[in-house]
Amino acid sequence: MKRTEPAVPVAAPAAAEAAAEQAQEDQPDEELADCVLCGEPTEYPASTRGATLCPVCAWQEAQRTACSG
Ligand SMILES: [Zn+2]
């Protein structure tokens, strides 16, 4: 038995992520915590516990951790 399956379009993950980020930005302004390293606003709410890092510093920290490990 042979049947042809319709081609399933592959959703671009990047597009989905972008859409998710857009959705986050649509939220009413909530106070965001400042990055503990450079002072830039992070994407975390001010109520986040612990040290908050902006995407840049978080990435740099990840690199350092990866190198030292
Ligand atoms: Zn930072």
Image (tube, rainbow, N blue to C red):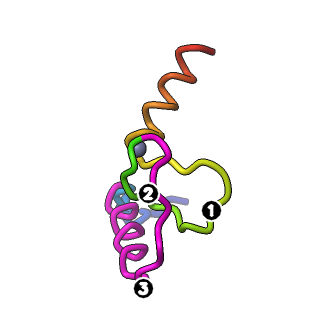
Q: Quadrant of ligand 1?
A: top left
Vertical arrangement, residue 41 with respect to residue 69, above or below: below
Q: Secondary structure at mark 3?
A: loop
Check disc 3 and give the amino acid type.
Answer: Pro
Whether residue 44 can be seen here = yes
Q: Amino acid at mark 1?
A: Thr
Residue 23 occupies quadrant: bottom left
Number of residues whose C-alpha sits closer than 10 Å to that of mark 2, classed few (under 14), some (14–19) or many (20 or more):
many
The earlier-in-sequence mark between 3 and 2 is 3
Q: Between marks 1 and 3, how big is the CA–CA gap? A: 17 Å
| Residue, disc 1 | 48
Measuring 37% from the left and 81% from the top, which residue is drawn there? 26
Q: Is residue 7 visible?
A: no
In the rendered structure, which amino acid carries the disc numbered 2? Thr
Answer left or right for 4 relative to 52: left
From the viewer's side, name the closer residue of 46 and 11: 46
Q: Which image quarter: residue 37?
A: top left
Distance (Cα) linking label 1 and label 2:
10 Å
**69 in relation to 50, above or below:** above
Which residue is disc 2 drawn over?
A: 42
Position of the C terminus by quadrant: top right
Q: Quadrant of residue 6?
A: bottom left
Magenta-drawn segment: 14-37
Label ID, residue 4: none
Label 2 beta carbon within 8 A of ligand 1: yes
Mark 2 and mark 1 in contact (Cβ < 8 Å)? yes
**What residue is at 39 percent from the left and 61 percent from the top?**
17
Residue, disc 3: 28
| CA–CA distance in space, label 3 to label 2 | 15 Å
Percent across and percent down for residue 15 are 32, 62
Which structural element holds mark 2?
strand
Q: Are marks 3 and 2 in contact (CB under 8 Å)?
A: no
